[in-house]
Amino acid sequence: MTQTKQAKNVVVIGTQWGDEGKGKIVDWLTDHAQGVVRFQGGHNAGHTLVVGQGAAQKVYKLNLVPSGIVRNGVSCYIGNGVVLDTTHLLHEISTLEQGGLDVTNRLKVSPGCPLILSHHVAVDVAREAKRSAEKKIGTTGKGIGPAYEDKVARRALRVYDLFYPDRFAEKLREVMDYHNFVLTNYLGATAVDFQQQYDASMQHADVLKPMVADISAALYEANARGEHLLFEGAQGTLLDVDHGTYPYVTSSNCIAGQASAGTGVGANMLHYVLGITKAYTTRVGGGPFPSELDIETEGAPGYQMSTKGQEIGTVTRRKRRCGWFDAAALRRSASINGLTGLCITKLDVLDGITSLDICTGYKLDGKIVDMLPVGADDVARCEPIYETVPGWTETTFGAKTWDALPKNAQHYLKRLEAVCGVPIAIVSTGPERDETIVLQHPFA
């Protein structure tokens, strides 16, 4: 196919422990894109999008459907790197369509997506219940981890199996026998029912089939036509199963390189990597967090981050832990992802905090380290080293130009840029699309 114009493709990555505000940025960037691609994770991800103002304002909460769905005419793709709960996907589609969005005609799903089935959820919940309090991972209990385990163990059922009922039944019975043995004999839980899962899967197959397409081929064709594509990650780099604070991580790779593996496109199609990071740091669930602050004491900086930032998990509804910006962790993310630029979100949450700390490194076993260590055990022993900078009392909420920011807010952002070694391309100053400062557009 002859390329008619030059395509530019952008990968959007969370650089912290997730919840950085990726959904809003992806939605905003789709003004310049013709397609949005989800390439890993499952419905344990949560993106909240705010569109419009006043009485016309609409809030969309997405888990599986790519954020581009709220832009008319944008194609959306779910790649093979995503584990798929068809019950949840079809419910999400129905909810969005009841809200006036055209989803079915614009969404394409890879036949290679591993399926999340009832036994995966049962195992996930039973395992977490069996762990002692100090060893709980903080899983969402949605079957994500066990589904990825089946994929790696080469016993997963995939979307393409749905369309061959006899083959699906044979594979399902075999894998369910295995998981039911574990559930009843090791985890002390109740077995799941084969027939109930089989019947539900066959019903879903009929609805899903028109949306199933070769995502790799579709993306190559779109690229050849010169269409701009956005590759949308879920969770965050520090939750990556290989590079995060293992074992307090998610079950997939959350880094930029997974955009290639999780969709079936070559790395040469990934032109710009935009790292999304809050102006502070948050984390949901268990695991070490060097710059963590007290979020319960009224008037404390962590309390303001928690309350003003509305730091409640979109999926889990748990309070997010909050802390100072961690530049040493960001350096790890920058190196893993090959970040081209940063987008700083939730700057306005810091308004009114007159003194801000930036974690620039750690003391670990008597030595100073300037990058987050690999694995939870070493991270848990890190003592943060802070640099203090002035805060500001003026508001940054809704600012749309750099000059509209208070001088100390500008200085704070420039300092983050310097200690992280990555240029800031975008500053988000509110949840709505136009509450955005552009210093370097990723599609330029």
Image (cartoon, rainbow, N blue to C red):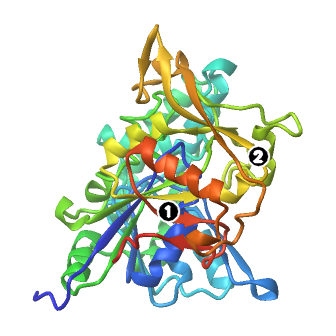
Residue farthest to the left?
2
Q: Which mark is residue 388?
A: none
Q: Which quadrant would residue 439 be assigned to in this image?
A: bottom left
Q: Secondary structure at mark 1?
A: helix
Residue 326 vertical placement versus 173 (above, below):
above
Task: Of the two numbered discs 1 and 2 on the same chain, state the one appearing first in sequence.
Answer: 1
Residue farthest to the right?
298
Position in image of residue 251 (x %, y %): 44, 40
Does any portion of residue 151 appear in the rendered image? Answer: no
Residue 309 vertical placement versus 405 (above, below):
above
Q: Secondary structure at mark 2?
A: loop
- The C terminus sits in image quarter: bottom left
Q: Which quadrant would residue 325 be assigned to in this image?
A: top right
Q: Nearer the viewer, residue 421 or 340?
A: 421
Residue at image x 81%, y 41%?
Answer: 303
Q: CA distance from mark 1 to mark 2?
A: 52 Å
Position in image of residue 104 (x %, y %): 49, 83
Residue at image x 80%, y 46%?
Answer: 304
- Report the residue marked by disc 1: 201
Q: Nearer the viewer, residue 208 or 131?
A: 131
Which residue type carries mark 2?
Answer: Ile
Q: Is residue 443 left or right of residue 116?
A: left
Position in image of residue 250 (x %, y %): 49, 40
Q: Which mark is residue 353?
A: 2
